[in-house]
Amino acid sequence: MTQPSSADVVIVGTGVVGIVIAEELLDAGVSVLMLEAGPRVSRAQIVENFRNLPLGLKGSASSSYPPRPWAPHPMPPTGNPDDTYLQLTGPDSYDQTFIRYAGGSTWHWAGTCWRMTPDDLRLQSLYGVGRDWAFDYDTLEPYYVRTEYRLGICGPSDPALQWPPRRSKPYPMGPLPFSPGEQRFTEVVKTLGYTNIPTAQARNSGVPYDERPACCGNNNCVPVCPIGAKYDGATALARLEAKGAVILSDAVAYRVETNARQQVEAVHYFDQNKVSHRVTGKHFVLACNGLENPKLLLMSADDRNPKGVANRSDQVGRNMMDHPQLGLSVTLAEPYWSGVGPVVNSGIMETSQGAFRSEHAGAYFRFNNFARNRFVTFNALKTGLVGKALDQEIRRQTACTADIILAHEMLPHADNRLTLSSKKDWLGLPKPSIHYDVGDYVRKSAEQYSLPIGRTIAAAMGATDVKVTPKFNQSKHIMGGTIMGNDPGNSVVDPDCRSHDHANLFLPGGGAMPSTACGNSTITMVALAFKAADALVKQAKGA
């Protein structure tokens, strides 16, 4: 069967960013061809994969998604260095988690959707650090609303509990109730002057929405919602096809081809048999994710673009960011019982704002609502107990332990950089190599601000033991590698996420974000996708 080879718009990637743009184009009468590096699978298959995992891997976000040889993605270490996809250097680890499956990494996200605030977009103007965005919050706000209604994001109606309260339309659904542990956490931090507020999240709260059922509190949102109450990109693929989209899975893009006019003319991809194909279009969108986008652009270097496509500024792959996090694992004198409802359901966001940002990062605090049994069982086994005594110890630790997470904003830095490794994958393509350092802005926050607050909270909770993670962990929020700006000399894309170098190439998503704030990045990625889609529809229709 001959594969389709052309469309008005070619989109590389079928995650939430690519899906949103595709649907806007299709609704405007523009033809769309989508390429997906990985396979297309059913929800039932992923749930069965999860069920069959050994207990030690059930806490892994990726282990339910075994990569195909032609579409590798990061997995838990096997002990064989040749199996490692990301090649990491630097003082800190950029060991991210994403999957190359149709539907993208929203398969295994927590669904958390914190908006950025007006101040988050003006770090340089207000605090003399980082970069300002190319537009203000009022420009972004309508796209946040469209995101909330497209994904089905629930949240509180009380402005005092919203983040930020400056919004033009209510959430489409109300918030989910707190678990017993979250409720106790909320009461404790209130005595310290902090407000633990409901998380806005892409999950149906008590009612069906967008043909998805209401959340029934399975608490394994990571790695998969077994009933599809949480939004994931896979829930939209059939709808796109019904509207006319052509979706090719197992299609690994490896080259973006430009012509003499510096327009993108085609994308080349390998199928699962290592056979190369070429697809042409009038406009192109790279929506692979914040690591695969810069990798593809760098692999596409040619005589006209010796540093890589869209890289006249030499900023492609630079400014890699995340939300560096520390964890406090606490043993408590009394039960808190986390694990009822979604895995992330609330947080303290007010600690992310303030004049201190001229000196150090803000931080966001949350009570992790993951059920504890799969984490504490191995600790209980180390006690040597057996039988009923072991069962009682597992129950005690499940009830009386908890994790408090401290997630920090970070600043863009050119030396936090993705390059092409000399090590190759199964297709012979270079693996991504990332050098990473969270920076003194984050370290100073941990030392002087976030950890002292975290320890104060732990003490107020009645902690009898507190263990702090020895290094910064990853939040798996990939940002910055194709950074946005008005100046083509120090940025990759313009305010519409259009490449400065190639007028028919769009690079929307987390890679474009010039600052991170402290909350999860997906809602902002999708807001940028809507903004890019508006510009792309206008451009494709010749308006």
Image: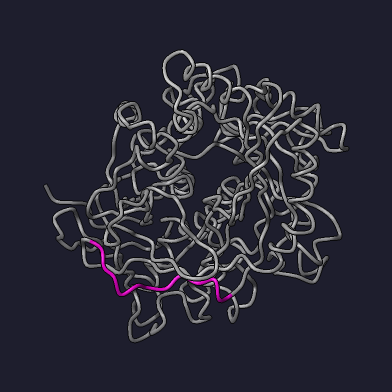
Residue at figure coordinates x 64%, y 29% from the top left? 154
| Residue 4 x %, y % | 22, 52
Front residue of this view, candidates 1 and 173: 173
Quarter assignment of residue 465: top right
Q: Is residue 503 magenta?
A: no
User: In screen coordinates, is 383 left or right of 462?
Assistant: left
The percent position of residue 362, horizontal first and vertical second, equals 75, 55
Residue lying at the far left of the rendered structure: 1
Q: Residue at horizontal 71%, vertical 43%? A: 365
Q: Nearer the viewer, residue 332 or 170?
A: 332
**In the image, residue 250 lies at what x, y percent?**
24, 49
Q: Establish if 499 lies above or below 371.
A: below
Q: Quadrant of residue 204?
A: top right
Query: What segment is highlighted magenta in the picture?
Result: 414-425
Residue at the (43%, 22%) spot, across then down: 227
Q: 58 and 342: which one is in front?
A: 58
Number of marks in the image? 0
Give yes or no for residue 419 being in the magenta stretch.
yes
Residue 471, x across and y down, in percent: 58, 57
Q: Is residue 318 visible?
A: yes
Q: Residue furthest top?
A: 388
Q: Is residue 122 visible?
A: no
